[in-house]
Amino acid sequence: MQWSKVRQTGKALPFWKILGVAGVVGVAATGIVVARAERRRRSYTPEEIKDRLRARHAEIQDS
């Protein structure tokens, strides 16, 4: 079957459209997850980060 005939009948296009939309949705979802994680990470003050690192270090030393 020639590409021009497939394109005219519209049988192959829905698959590519669905695949393209799924890709766009996946990229958008990944961006949202990354933005949330970044926002959560930046919400800590430097003192809170130091305290958390010291607590994690103490946990490791106790094990």
Image (cartoon, rainbow, N blue to C red):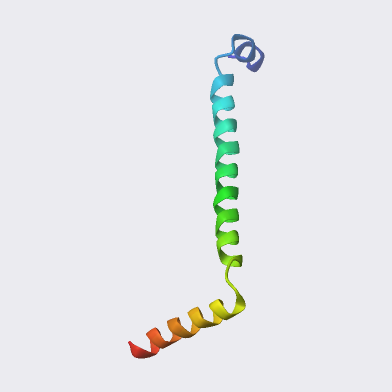
The extreme left residue here reads 63
Nearest the eye: 52 or 16: 52
Nearest the eye: 26 or 35: 35
> How many circles with numbers are drawn on the protein?
0
Against 30, is 50 above or below? below
Residue in the foreground of this view, choosing between 45 and 14: 45
Residue 43 lies left or right of residue 63; in this view the side is: right
Q: Is residue 25 above or below residue 33?
A: above
The image position of residue 39, as x and y in percent, is 60, 60
Q: What quarter of the picture does the N terminus occupy?
A: top right
Residue depicted at 55% across the width and 14% down the height: 11
**Up-down relation of residue 38 to residue 20 (above or below):** below
Residue at the spot 59% in from the left edge and 13% down from the top edge: 10
Residue under the point 57% across and 48% down: 32
- Residue 9 percent coordinates (x, y): 59, 9
Residue 45: x %, y % from top left: 60, 74
Height in image: 19 above or below 10? below
Residue 25: image x %, image y %?
56, 38
Q: Residue at x 60, y 61 (%)?
A: 38
Considering every residue shown, the one lying at the far bottom of the view is: 61
